Image (tube, rainbow, N blue to C red):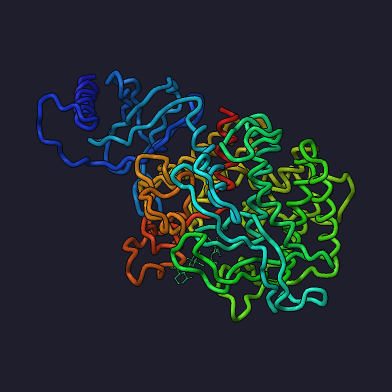
Amino acid sequence: MRKQLSYVITLTLIFLVVVGCNPAGQAVSEPENTIHVNQLGYLPDGHKSAIIIGPSEGFLIVDVDSKKIVHTGELSAPQQWAASGEDARIADFSSFSAPGNYVLIAGGSGSHQFEISRDVYSDVAKASIKAFYFHRASTALDEKYAGVYARTAGHPDTQVGIHASAASESRPEGTKISAPKGWYDAGDFGKYIVNSAITVTTMMSVFEHYPEKSGMISTNIPESGDETPDLLDEIKWNLDWMLTMQDPQDGGVYHKLTTKSFPGMIMPEEDTEPRWIVMKTTPATLDFVASMAQASRVYKPYDSEFSEQCLTAALKAWEWTQNNMEVYYTQPEDIHTGAYDQPGKGFKDEKFWAATELSITTGETYESEIPSPLLVPEWRDGAALASMNLLNYQEDEAVKKVFFVLADSLLKAQMASPYDVSNDYFRWGSTSDFLNQAMILLYAYKASGEKAYKDAAQSTFDWVLGKNPTGYSFVTGFGQKTAKHIHHRPSEGDAIAEPQPGWVIGGPNPENKEDCGEDAYTSPYPALAYMDQLCSYATNEIAINWNGVFVYVAIALDAEG
Ligand code: 9MR
Ligand code: 9MR
């Protein structure tokens, strides 16, 4: 008892120091521990955990306004995490649910301030959708909608050249076609079908799974106030471009539209190099089928003509693939932009994705087979998304079984994880792996009602907003410590210090450590292979697919509460 009392007193003093109220005026000692929290905060009824590195008997939560201790708890036993080399303890305070602003204190240190509130993710969800508006090609961004990020129009894309690799009888090399609109893919200004497809389908899927919540988000874009939800208006900007990437002659879909090389760190309007349409491929065409088939049903209530156009395009593209099931992307010699290629992988998952979306929309059967095991979605693989969409419309025991094998493996991983997250594998865009896993777990919760899935999703989502060993929130503008020097041309090229808000950055990636010069990354641990530096395109770039799944998870958590 006495021990516990002195512990509480010590922690209270530490708290006073940490939150800046230091009555005795004593010197502030260096924090002994490192505490990682979701820097935005937590939902009142949701799972809540923080990671503590360093020795401590327990932890406290203090209300920042009243300066009162509102919760005390024990830490889990320390566990080595191979990904970061740390001994991590979990502070689980799920049972504490009172809304407010707090800090968590353990072992002589305080966390960043965080909030517990029912709408703690509403603003970031909205900002992550708004980010896509900042990436619209072929239009000026009006100050009324873009604020300080207003800019003149870039990339009209009305005179794009057919590259030799894309030449056909009706469109010989050098033919100029018009392919305006779309979103810039990432820190570069390219427009890539494969990555566009996974992005729009993920975002249309959150609309289908949570129509009410998704439908009421207003992002202050030029289309706001029309009959169509803002989320769908935003997605349509990219779908309109995607439709132009289909060869009207044979239905095949071109892989990408880019300059021959990446431009420097300039604004869109300064990038005036010629742009090219590069070869048709099987993955681009199948992914296009999936996106257009889904768009056809999603937009039907708002725009029947557009819905018809999407379905016609999807069916024509599907037809092309029937004789072209193995056309891989191979980067032409004179093209140096992103490849989004998948050498030797096979296209079983793309085929399942396309066929499933077509079936859901038309009610007809399109032959394909579910890949088993299903993998966590990414730009290379939309099969799990397709399975979610199918389950959203019909009970299919076989698909359900395969889907839950994936969800259960993620749940199991989270429950055993020293960091309380489902992922422990790091590569380019690792942040999006956490998010895609959280999406699968959330859908498992939706389909089963089992709260453990939602808890695992929440805890894995926390990673992205700061509960990770780098201490950064990986969403620009959201959290106490966020990336400032992202590899993003408009953020570097404009005169504004802060990067555009609402962008998800790639995060730790041990796969490419050359981008900032040899020896720039000092940690040998994969989860710490991250730098908030402009040069670090392999860890500090942003991309539409990473944002797309953030939109899904943030809206879903906001909706589920
Ligand atoms: O800026 C480019 C970024 O958008 C890409 O994601 C990345 C990987 O394809 O490449 C970046 O461009 C770099 C190029 O690949 C190598 N030279 C340095 C370029 C940027 O500084
Ligand atoms: O997200 C892509 C990642 O999975 C790949 O490993 C990497 C290298 O091929 O490319 C990433 O995609 C980039 C694309 O090629 C060009 N635009 C920027 C994308 C994000 O870095």
Regarding residue 561, the answer to whether it shows in the image is yes
Residues 205 and 485: in front is 485
Residue 349 vertical position relative to residue 278 in the rendered view, above or below: above
Location of the C terminus (image quadrant): top right
Residue at 46%, 56% (x, y): give it.
490
Q: How many labels does the image show?
A: 0
Residues 159 and 132: in front is 159
Residue situated furthest bottom in the rendering = 333
Location of the N terminus (image quadrant): top left
Residue situated furthest right in the rendering = 364
Residue 235 at what x, y percent from top left? 66, 46
Residues 552 and 191: in front is 191
Residue 32 at what x, y percent from top left? 22, 41
Residue at 70%, 57% (x, y): give it.
242
Regarding residue 545, the answer to whether it shows in the image is no
Residue 408 falls left or right of residue 535: right
Residue 348 at what x, y percent from top left? 75, 61
Q: Which quadrant would residue 15 be assigned to in this image?
A: top left
Residue at 34%, 27% (x, y): give it.
102
Residue 487 vertical position relative to residue 308 in the rendered view, above or below: below
Residue 383 falls left or right of residue 268: right
Q: Which quadrant would residue 313 be assigned to in this image?
A: bottom right
Residue 412 at what x, y percent from top left? 56, 43
Residue at 42%, 59% (x, y): give it.
493
Residue 259 falls left or right of residue 93: right
Residue 141 vertical position relative to residue 69 in the rendered view, above or below: below
